[in-house]
Image (cartoon, rainbow, N blue to C red):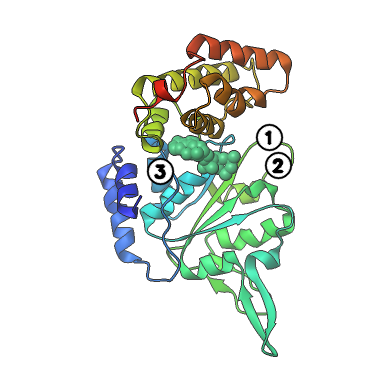
């Protein structure tokens, strides 16, 4: 998919014209001429309201925090937004080993000389990219402290031993976090107050159908509807707290469709993609029952695809 095609898929969801004009002026004001590519996301984000709200936040100059469960599209939304702004993205994963010097950069020796090698946050901030602070709540405090002056009105990065770096006016920050999983922490309030926050929903039927027809153009309409209905059933059980979120896994659902295409039956494929993620016997049975109600389990590639 080209950048133009991706942009059409994103804006074609009926985003407000005023917002699209603002995005266009942003792109004209800050045309990207660097060597790093403005990447096309692997999937476009489907979800008009969230796209509008997120784009408005970035155009207003706010830092954006995307909160949501696994596979809610946090990363593809961040990448889709970078594309709409026409700026390249730098992805920084905040695992436990990330420290301040990794983010900012450090002195290294090259040809007998000390040289500063910028870290991803420094590079992105100075060139005016979109910095994706991925899984920000996994960060240790020391790494979070770097972000404070960067993310408020000062828009400054403290670089130890060097002058402070003033952010490029086009630089934007998008953080993502899962909430409440093992290993995640609360964001402290001072850091949280530097963001506007969007809670990403698990996609609904309409978004799923759009995603299916994008990813599997030859998937039959009825097959797509069947899977979407199953996913909605699982979502409902999850919302009613009857099951955990393990089987509510869009990545797993997409993988299942790929397995069906390769010749596995629907039952086999959905077992691998969704059902077998439930380790509790009762929960597994419940998901299997939902499956039996919704899908014709012995169907395979022939019934699913029109190739
Ligand atoms: N609204 C959506 N539009 C398009 N694709 C979506 C959407 N929501 C989820 N997906 C799909 O879910 C998968 C995961 O997307 P992504 O990696 O962005 O999720 P995430 O929220 O960052 O997950 P995690 O918390 O596990 O990192 C992709 O295959 C993506 O296509
Ligand atoms: Mg992610």
Q: Residue at x 52, y 46 (%)?
A: 75
x, y (%) of residue 121? 58, 64
x, y (%) of residue 120? 58, 65
Query: What is the quadrant of the C terminus in the image?
Result: top left
Disc sitting over residue 297 in the figure: none
Q: Quadrant of ligand 2?
A: top right
Number of marks in the image? 3
> Label 2: few (<14), some or many (≥20) within 10 Å?
some
Q: Is residue 18 left or right of residue 279?
A: left
What residue sits right under mark 3 in the picture? 44
Residue situated in front as seen by the camera: 198 or 91:
91
- Say if disc 3 is inside 8 Å of ligand 1: yes
x, y (%) of residue 248? 57, 26
What residue sits right under mark 1 in the picture? 180
Q: Is residue 21 left or right of residue 138?
A: left
What residue sits right under mark 2 in the picture? 184
């Amino acid at each position: 998919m080209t950048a133009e095609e991706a942009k059409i898929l994103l804006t074609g969801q009926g985003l407000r014209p005023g917002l699209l004009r603002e995005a266009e002026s942003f792109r004209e004001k800050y045309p990207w001429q660097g060597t790093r590519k403005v990447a096309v996301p692997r999937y476009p984000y489907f979800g008009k309201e969230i796209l509008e709200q997120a784009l408005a936040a970035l155009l207003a100059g706010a830092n954006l925090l995307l909160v949501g469960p696994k596979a809610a599209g946090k990363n593809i939304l961040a990448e889709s937004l970078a594309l709409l702004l026409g700026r390249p993205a730098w992805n920084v994963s905040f695992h436990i080993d990330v420290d301040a010097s990794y983010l900012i950069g450090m002195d290294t020796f090259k040809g007998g000389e000390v040289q500063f090698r910028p870290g991803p946050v420094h590079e992105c901030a100075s060139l005016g990219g979109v910095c994706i602070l991925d899984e920000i709540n996994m960060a240790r405090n020391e790494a979070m402290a770097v972000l404070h002056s960067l993310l408020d009105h000062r828009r400054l990065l403290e670089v130890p031993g060097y002058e402070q770096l003033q952010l490029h006016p086009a630089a934007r920050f998008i953080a993502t976090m899962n909430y409440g999983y093992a290993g995640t922490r609360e964001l402290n309030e001072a850091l949280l107050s530097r963001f506007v926050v969007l809670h990403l929903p698990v996609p609904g039927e309409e978004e799923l159908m759009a995603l299916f027809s994008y990813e599997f153009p030859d998937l039959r309409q009825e097959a797509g509807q069947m899977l979407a209905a199953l996913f909605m059933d699982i979502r409902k059980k999850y919302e009613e707290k009857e099951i955990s979120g393990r089987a509510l896994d869009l990545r797993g659902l997409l993988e299942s469709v790929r397995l069906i295409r390769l010749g596995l039956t629907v039952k086999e494929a959905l077992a691998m993609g969704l059902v077998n993620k439930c380790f509790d016997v009762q929960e597994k049975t419940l998901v299997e029952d939902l499956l039996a109600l919704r899908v014709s389990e012995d169907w395979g590639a022939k019934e699913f695809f029109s190739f």
